[in-house]
Amino acid sequence: MRNRPIGVFDSGLGGLTTVNELRKILPHEDIIYLGDTARVPYGTKSRETVLKYAEQDFGFLSRLGVKFTIAACGTVSSVKVGEDSFDADLCTGVIIPAVKAACRATVNKRIGVIATSASIRSESYERLIKYVMPEAKVFSKACPMFVPLVENGYVGRECEPTAAFAREYLSPLKDEGIDVLILGCTHYPLLSDVISDVVGGGVKLISSGAEAARCAKMLLEQKGLLCEGKSAGKMKLYCTDSPELFKENASRFIDISGATVERCSVE
Amino acid sequence: MRNRPIGVFDSGLGGLTTVNELRKILPHEDIIYLGDTARVPYGTKSRETVLKYAEQDFGFLSRLGVKFTIAACGTVSSVKVGEDSFDADLCTGVIIPAVKAACRATVNKRIGVIATSASIRSESYERLIKYVMPEAKVFSKACPMFVPLVENGYVGRECEPTAAFAREYLSPLKDEGIDVLILGCTHYPLLSDVISDVVGGGVKLISSGAEAARCAKMLLEQKGLLCEGKSAGKMKLYCTDSPELFKENASRFIDISGATVERCSVE
């Protein structure tokens, strides 16, 4: 069991920011990644549709025999959080780890959350923060253009349209005096520079995907499920659309040299 | 046969610009529209995936007994153009009608084409223009951010990020001295103002979706298949994701009062 791979999935490329963190903190683990690129994005779709896609993604990784699954997708995490089989022993989403980190980090208890429309509509981040820290004030904002901007490579602080959307979405949060901002979608860490330019360097950014990776490490340690090998872990990437397109785009998120990329069907 | 509905489909909402034109020029016809909103967008996906989705969309409309089908999606049209069963007697895509209109309209034979990444990668517009008018010069540009901008409502000329993307994509075409520009994706007519601001009012914009509607009218007339009724045609809308989300977003494209909206599965 302990030498099986860790499974990570997302609607597209965003979850690779979680894989990056996993490889840093658990360099010996084998990782299987699934990006549902034939149906990306999830964040503009309805709860029922996201739930259906998430079940299929889970099923695919489970059939490959992973020992632990990370739903490295803020949208999936927001519609699944609270379900018995989710955020359980051998599975984590990104919301609980991100909320715990934000509540540890805030001093003035004014917490900002940015995520996809589906995640914000679910109010999952807000409800969980209120559960962990009832006295906290939460300021949420959907940022529907951030995923397409990242997927198309418009991520630099010199990209004026990206900066303009960041001002539109984030200025209201800055005005509320937040001291912590949860990046509630795993695509958003690629926009950290642009986001910090608007909210100011004093606001601590919490990467939900990186927090989920740290949570996975902790749970695997607790259960004695870390791998025994001491060589570098292998990485296998699956996508539901063209592997060529995936490789081209994934290299913006992560160093994929040495990894295999294969097309799969999850339906 | 002649009193059956006309079927129109697109990956999402863009094809509704075709429905708008159909209702203007064929007000007595019943129309069935399918938007594959659970898998939108198509334009960033691979040829194989778009072909698979298109077959399923065609199959759905065909099972409902439509008398004529319009693939009101530039991406689907670009991967299907040239196939025997496509752009045939009882079916049209948007590319052939748009190219014919552009070749009629150009004076200096310098034609611009903007479309999704998948459409531009297919080179379908370019090859067809060269076939119809071998001496034409064609200048093509993929505009990957236009669909998410439209789907999220950022369509006005006062929207600075939209204007910035329009300048990035369109300035090179303007510099080439085009006198006609094909809007090769059915979402783009909603950006006509912003597009004209960059290329100048002297450049004629060709709406591929509206041209497809006119082509459908001509073919139905030729075959004696126009409906006999003289009352206003009915409109039935299907979508693969939430009908509530669809209604909310569709009202930006079209007056849907009186139309029914239903969720369907096409897989």
Image (tube, coloured by chain):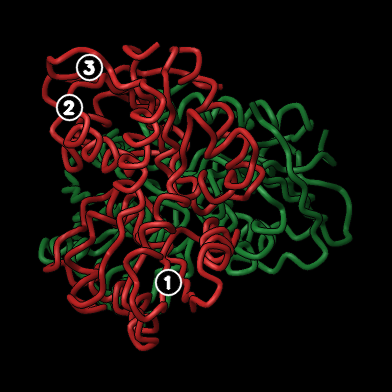
Chain colours: A red, B green
**Within 10 angstroms of label 1, few (less than 14), some, or many (20 or more) residues?**
many
Residue ID for mark 3: A260
| Of the pair A258 and B142, the residue shown nearer to us | A258
Query: Which of the chains bears the disc numbered 2?
Result: A
A217 vs B140, left or right, is: right
Query: Are the residues flagged by discs 1 and 2 from a single subunit?
Result: no
Q: Amino acid at mark 2?
A: Pro
| Of the pair A205 and A215, the residue shown nearer to us | A215
Query: Are the residues flagged by discs 3 and 2 from a single subunit?
Result: yes
Measure the C-alpha gap from mark 1 to mark 2: 43 Å
> Can see residue B74?
no
Name which quarter of the figure residue B224 lies in: top right
Query: Which of the chains bears the disc numbered 1?
Result: B
Residue ID for mark 2: A27
Residue closest to the far bottom: A175
Q: Amino acid at mark 1?
A: Tyr
